[in-house]
Amino acid sequence: MEDLDTLIVTIRRHYPDADLGLVTDAFAFAREAHAEQRRLSGMPYFSHVHGVAVILAEWEMPPAVVAAGILHDIPEETPRTTDDIRARFGPEVASIVAGETKLSKLKYRGVERYAENLRKMFVALAENHHTIIVKFADRLHNLRDLTVFPLEKQRRIARETIEIYSSIANRLGMYRVKAQLEDGAFPYLHPEEASWVESLVAEREHTNREVCAAFQQLVLTELTAHHIPAIAIIGRTKSRYRLYQKLLVHERDISRIYDLVGIRIIVGSTIDCYTALSAIHERWQPVKGRIRDYIANSKPNGYQSLHTTVTADLGEFVELQIRTRTMHEEAEWGAAASWRYHEPGTAHARPGQFRWVEELIRWQHSIGDPKEFIDRLREEILRERILVFTPKGDVIELPEGATPIDFAYAVHTDVGHHAVGALVNDASAPYPLDRPLRHSDVVEILINPKRKSPNPDWIASARTGYAREKIREAIRSDARVKTVS
Ligand code: MN
């Protein structure tokens, strides 16, 4: 039987002094409430909620969130209600559990179900951030006994995990969670491909682990010689699904993957990151074109690190990522970095961090057609983001592939309507209005105030629904003016 000790030990690793009364109580409450129930697999139902709680503890979530994880299926699966949970465990735990219950009730099928699921996930995210992480843990645990379902259902759940859950985790910068969800779903979605990747990894695992361990030791020696204190040197394994995607890009040739063996170096300060990088380059030859400074030029989602690939002593490639502890936390956990070690309701999001969620909830009501909703969501929200700048240095966030038209409308509707050209990065030649912008471009929109209305062709060049809507509106009202006069 699932024991409380495993759970307590896992929580204690990160919360050595916390009061675990809530967790102990939730454990007893849920074990009793689910006592008679079994999962489809024949396992006691309680083993599922216990498993979810262990995952949350491994993700270093605070005790109240772990407690909510144990209780997450109670209102849905037992006669006990959210009110019972509120009375016994307080409003914060009850709010997370209520969020889970709402998420589990889907009315529709097919594409409508898909849209409904997405909408609910975002509403839950806005209401209580911890709801989404409990949902991720629930899904991850469910993936572990998916084999009891018919093949078609296994595939549907796996696809939904990758398309919805891991996309949202990605958008939130929660890379560790994203990788776990993808690796959990991969074998159900592409069984043959997954075992092929598994065998490629297995063939190399032993050698790679040895290369990694030996190189970690050498790096430590090198850093010590340069008086750079290392907080940690960690071996990194590439997630199976990410590796699979890379293989598809590189004609399935594993010898073309340079970052199979990876090491992360965690140091105390930004200066130490750069010093460590030069110490490493002094000792090992860097591979051309693979040095990236994501500290000076952080990725649009805020990711920071120095990356380099070097040729180790026996000619093998090793990828190194050098970062501070804060950068590391952000890289692994993204938005959830600030949810850990904070009881629910006390974590503070960075200003603007969830603006896109609020915006999405605002426009989702205006779109009735589920297919259109999903398309727009894929295009604008789940796509990678780029940050571009106005000449004054204001930051505009756009989906990858956005053009100067999108930029102009994001600045102001009037700028969009009157745009006649764009200048990018101080170039004197005009930049085509339909050419995609790149991350960190500085964009100046040239306007002609006399211009009457936008060019209808722009609808095709715009990537954001917002710009397309504004262009359509302007064209419609322009047409009305013409008919009247
Ligand atoms: Mn569940």
Image (spheres, helix red, strand yellow):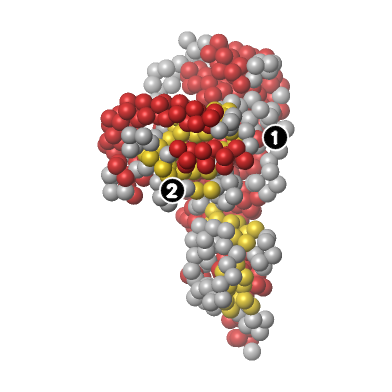
Q: Is residue 338 left or right of residue 438?
A: right
Q: Quadrant of residue 478?
A: bottom right
- Within 10 Å of disc 1 (Cα), the crowding (few <14, some 14-19, many 20+) is some
Quadrant of res 91:
top right
Quadrant including the C terminus: bottom right
Q: Note whether 55 is above or below 302 in the view shown.
A: above
Residue under numbered circle 1: 347
Residue under the image location 51 percent in, 38 percent down = 279
Q: Find residue 62 and report its horizontal and vertical position in percent.
A: 64, 25
Residue type at mark 2: give it. Arg
Q: Residues within 10 Å of mark 2 (few under 14, many from 20)?
A: few
> At numbered mark 2, what does the secondary structure look like: helix, strand or loop?
loop
At x 58%, y 14%, the residue is 8
Residue at x 65% of width, y 58% of height: 395
Residue tagged 2: 290
Q: Nearer the viewer, residue 199 or 227?
A: 227
- Earlier residue among tags 1 and 2: 2
Label 1's element?
loop
Task: Look at the picture and state if 35 lies above or below 297.
Answer: above
- Separation (CA) of disc 1 from disc 2: 37 Å
Instruction: Return the x and y of residue 101 as percentages of the image width and height.
Output: 57, 32
x then y, percent, for residue 103: 55, 37
Q: Position of residue 153 (x, y in %)?
A: 36, 36
Query: Please, what is the three-letter code of the amino acid marked with disc 1?
Result: Ala
Q: Residue furthest bottom?
A: 485
Q: Is residue 74 left or right of residue 17?
A: left
Judging depth in this view, the residue of 352 and 238 nearest the camera is 238
Nearer the observer: mark 1 or 2; the answer is 2
Comparing 216 with 181, the one in front is 216
